[in-house]
Amino acid sequence: MSTPQAVTKSQRSAKHAVTVWIRRLHMYLGLLNFSLLIVFGVAGLAATADVPELFSEPSSVASHPFTPPPNASDREVARLIAALIQPNHAGDPAVRRNDSNQLVTDFNSINGRVRATSFESEHRVEVRTFRNSIWRFIDNAHATTISQRKRDSVVLAWAWYIEFSIWSLTLMAISGVWLGIASRWNSGWTRASLAAGAAAFLILYYLER
Amino acid sequence: MYRWIRTSHLVLGLSSALFVLLYAVSAAQMAHRWPLTRQVTDEDLTLPAGLAARPLSAALMDHRGYHGELRNPQTTPAGIRIVIARPGARYVVNYNAATGQAHIRREIFGFLAMINQLHTLNGLHHADLTLNAWGWALVAFSLDLIALGLSGIYLWFRIHIERAIGTVLLAANLAVSAGLLVALRL
């Protein structure tokens, strides 16, 4: 029959084994998500710095021969323009008419905007490419999620990596708290940082409420 | 050096754990489109007639206790429509400038809706100081994430028995993310 001391020792040993595995999980997830942590951090700073969405001048202007079918709707014409110019990584286009009644089709992507203006009487489409800065690109990259389904395979692969990272961060936050409490609870730093972080969060949450 | 970085990693991680959870859960909400809830109530008020957008929002903030940021003032046939918003609530005010009658739709956001708003709140130049406070918290949190990533790499590298598997995981992370980011930027 085990003595109370033996039971306590066995419980400590089990807790230690769990902590070792949680530390390993925390570390492995951190290594698999290192670059995403940097992306998320830079995205937060870029959003704060209010970097402009796009450069005001197009990085390239091109013209392609294009005659829309006479019976096509604006949205069908936009789809034909998409097939013609094949803008990288763009989702569904935004279609409108400008003041001169020309069809303007915007293809927004992680890199900025490709704007195609159809000059029907001249049988051509003008394509202006507005790139964004690297900072806005990173901001857009961090906001790419699996909810954006109508994208190409590269965007979807990145979105799934972001998805993996979202759940990894959740696990890392929980496992990090466990590690702090389980292995360094006697340190004043552990208690002070946990209390200060929780207090700061709750005060801010209450103020924003 | 090692002890200092280990303590810094601990302090930064523990102090930001709730912020990490907020951003992660709200990101999951956006990715999976979990439904957002809000409690909506309507109210009619009589205010002084002839107010412009800013005096109108000031009157509501000073005398009715609303707080937030004045957004999107619009002229309507009868007067003005304004929105006073903060992450936890939104007031849509339709004001008749001739009579002073105001119809107010008050929307109080549920937990997921509020953290969704907090996720997208940024900037340091809001009229409402509490919004700026969150903006500063975002700056601190962003720097914190970068510092946690870098210090985590250092701490891992100091554990000799984990170097082999860690190198594989880190190399996989860098190769996949760099490859995808370059492919996205092209």
Image (cartoon, coloured by chain):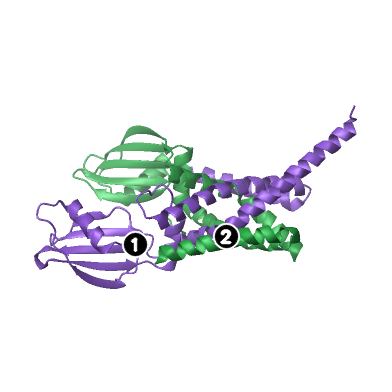
Quadrant of the rendering where the N terminus of chain A is positioned: top right
Residue at image point 69% right, 61% down: B164
Disc 1 marks which amino acid? Answer: Asn
Residue at image point 12% right, 66% down: A123
Which one is nearer the viewer's eye here, A3 or B35? Answer: A3
Are the residues flagged by discs 1 and 2 from a single subunit?
no
Q: Which chain is green?
A: B
Determine whether A88 is above or below B16 in the image: below
Quadrant of the rendered image containing residue A66: bottom left
Q: Secondary structure at mark 1?
A: loop
Q: Tell me the tag on residue A88.
A: 1
Which one is nearer the viewer's eye here, A53 or A191? Answer: A53
CA neighbours of label 1 inside 10 A, class few (<14), some (14 to 19), many (20+): many
Residue B22 pos. (x, y %)? 53, 46
Res B87 seen here: no
Chain letter of disc 2 in the image: B
- Left or right for B138, reference A11: left
Disc 2 marks which amino acid? Answer: Ala
Residue B67 pos. (x, y %)? 43, 45
Q: Tell me the tag on residue B172.
A: 2
- Left or right for A146, reference A115: right
Determine whether B75 is above or below A139 in the image: above
CA neighbours of label 2 inside 10 A, class few (<14), some (14 to 19), many (20+): some
Quadrant of the rendered image containing residue A141: bottom left
The picture's colour for chain A is: purple
Residue at image point 71% right, 46% down: A21
Determine whether B125 is above or below B88 in the image: below
Residue B171 pos. (x, y %)? 59, 62
Chain letter of disc 1 in the image: A
